[in-house]
Image (cartoon, helix red, strand yellow):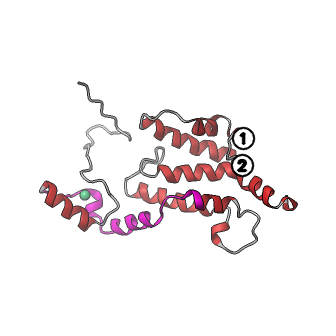
Amino acid sequence: MTVEVRALRPIKKNQEVTFSYIDDLLRPTAERQANLREGYKFTCQCDACTDSSSDERRAQIARLEPTSLQEYATWLTSADKASTNPKFADDYLIDRAKQAIALYMREQLSEPDVPHNALTHAETVLACHLARCMKREAVFWAGKVRTREVAMSRPLTRYTTRALNEPEQHELWNGRVTYVGKESPQKL
Ligand SMILES: [Zn+2]
């Protein structure tokens, strides 16, 4: 039998390679440590466990849940609404997802080029840029999503391939305006 182990991030020479013993890394330090003491009989000294500001960042990540399809649909249809509702702003979902990604990176749970735990947020940023016809940004974020897919040995999806190679043919392209057009053509 052969076991293949792949690193999802670059490993420097002599860098210690560590492994997480628990699944829900967003739980507070005290809970993680109690779990580790009980199950594995050691007190964890990792960066997160020894950084007192880590808990608040992880709690914030948990509050910034990935965008749901319903939220995306609401945002798509809000382009023509002259409203002060911040959820209708062009950058609302992008800003929220980028904030989550930044926190994941700060907590060493994601990488700049490979959105490990932040994949669903990276997919949101990609989808929003496609919907707003922002080609350069869409291709840039499609590259990150693709890198993660490759790292996970997932089959390449048509969804990502099209975003990367022919974003203007993507089903989400211009989605925000097109949807508004269908609802209220007089505003186009
Ligand atoms: Zn730890």
Q: Position of residue 67 (x, y in %)?
A: 54, 59
Q: Residue at x 57, y 56 (%)?
A: 69
- Quarter of the image where the N terminus is located: top left
Looking at the image, how many numbered discs can be counted on the residues? 2
Could you say which quadrant of the image residue 159 lies in?
top right
Residue where numbered disc 1 is placed: 168
- Quarter of the image where the C terminus is located: bottom right
Q: Position of residue 107 (x, y in %)?
A: 37, 57
Q: Is the residue 120 above or below the residue 147 in the image?
A: below
Check the image and name the residue furthest to the bottom: 84
Number of residues whose C-alpha sits closer than 10 Å to that of mark 1, classed few (under 14), some (14–19) or many (20 or more): some
User: Does residue 6 appear left or right of residue 74 in this picture?
Assistant: left
Disc 1 to disc 2: CB gap under 8 Å: yes
Q: Amino acid at mark 1?
A: Glu
Q: Residue at x 42, y 56 (%)?
A: 104
Q: Is the residue 25 above or below the residue 172 in the image?
A: below
Q: Secondary structure at mark 1?
A: helix
Q: Earlier in the sequence, mark 1 or mark 2?
A: 2
Check the image and name the residue furthest to the left: 41
Q: Residue at x 61, y 64 (%)?
A: 92
Q: Position of residue 186 (x, y in %)?
A: 88, 61
Check if residue 113 falls in the magenta segment: no
Say whether residue 43 is visible. Answer: no
Check the image and name the residue furthest to the right: 186
Q: Which residues are magenta?
A: 42-70
Q: Secondary structure at mark 2?
A: loop
Say whether residue 129 is visible. Answer: yes
Q: Residue at x 26, y 62 (%)?
A: 49
User: Does residue 94 appear left or right of residue 108 in this picture?
Assistant: right
As rendered, which of 116 and 39 lies closer to the eye?
39
Number of residues whose C-alpha sits closer than 10 Å to that of mark 2, classed few (under 14), some (14–19) or many (20 or more): some
Residue where numbered disc 2 is placed: 133
